[in-house]
Image (tube, rainbow, N blue to C red):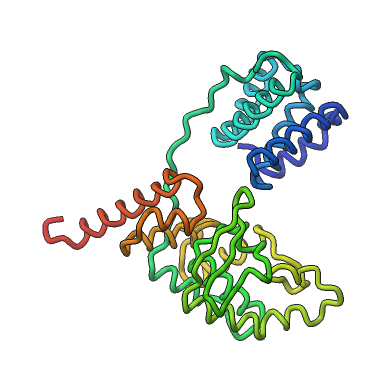
Amino acid sequence: MPTPTDRRLAARHLPPLADADAAVIEAFLDAIWAEHGLAQATLAAYRSDLQALARQHPGIAGLPREALFAHLSQRAQQGYSPRSTARLLSGLHAFYAHAVRCGLRADDPSALLQAPTLPRLLPKALSESQVAALLEAPNSSSAAGLRDRAMLELMYACGLRVSELVTLASTAVNLRQGVLRVRGKGNKERLVPLGEESSHWLARYLDSARPQLLAGVRQPAGVAVLFVSERGDALSRQAFWVLVKRYAVMAGINPSQISPHGLRHSFATHLLNHGADLRALQMLLGHSALATTQIYTLVARERLQDLHARHHPRG
């Protein structure tokens, strides 16, 4: 599969994007955002995929089906993953359905294109003891370490996505009521209970660490966000992932066992293991469909089978 470096090098030799193609792609993205409220990450992925197609085959709105087949064939030869191809096809179906609705063309050239079958990947959840070790890894005597402890505690206590965590508004926390206001995918808002432990670390962060991190910043750009970097701005998803990997190593956890959403997956799995209702878990995670939440029942079931096999006298 091509690496990010390979793609950056290849991008330098791509032909420029035609103005007409750029305009029709942006019009589509504006329309689909207004209609479905897609997340910014999804819109960015659609933009990247459609621009890549338009650079290879200008006049994207009027492309024949053969051009789409040629583009997919080229990607297959370059080693793109089935998941990447499935995302591209999702964008193509949406784009050409929009083009037909707007009268830009009469037919949908993507109609017969089928997404590849994807393996069902179960979320990787840590054990409760591993989570405890990870949460205790940051050095809370420093401002940055106290911030990191508060972030990890909050992610595990509330089952947040990484993107939700790093973009939390400074006004999202209500320690008195013990709730967090989260803005998730599709700009949907939900209220999540904090819990005593995460409330404790958040209070410590807000009282001392956050003011220290912002003290030397002349015009702090991150005042609007809850968690700030040493420069006073918001942490990126990539920067937080680097921190998580570092703390995983410190906690004795194999980095291959953890993912950027590892604490979110652990939150969901541990709640189910302790008897949480699936519908309640759906609301806490911010899933629009129950089927998305149900995948965690498979993780919990695997865990129960493993426990039975290891501890039952006739396992």
Decide if residue 262 is on the left or right side of residue 214. left
Q: Nearer the viewer, residue 268 or 241?
A: 268
Decide if residue 32 is on the left or right side of residue 261. right
Q: Nearer the viewer, residue 126 or 191?
A: 191
The correct choice, above or below, for 234 with respect to 46 in the image is below
Q: Quadrant of the N terminus?
A: top right
Residue at image position (50%, 62%) is 159
The correct choice, above or below, for 265 with respect to 24 in the image is below
Q: How many marks?
A: 0
Decide if residue 115 is on the left or right side of residue 46. left
* Residue 36 x/y as whole percent: 63, 40
Decide if residue 57 is on the left or right side of residue 142. right
For residue 14, which quarter of the picture? top right
Residue at image position (77%, 26%) is 54
* Residue 25 x/y as whole percent: 77, 32
* Residue 86 x/y as whole percent: 56, 32
Judged from this view, the residue extending furthest toward the left is 314
The correct choice, above or below, for 113 with respect to 224 in the image is above
The correct choice, above or below, for 131 with respect to 95 in the image is below
For residue 67, which quarter of the picture? top right
Residue at image position (80%, 22%) is 58
Residue at image position (53%, 71%) is 179
Q: Nearer the viewer, residue 293 or 1?
A: 293
Q: Nearer the viewer, residue 77 or 35?
A: 35
Q: Quadrant of the C terminus?
A: bottom left
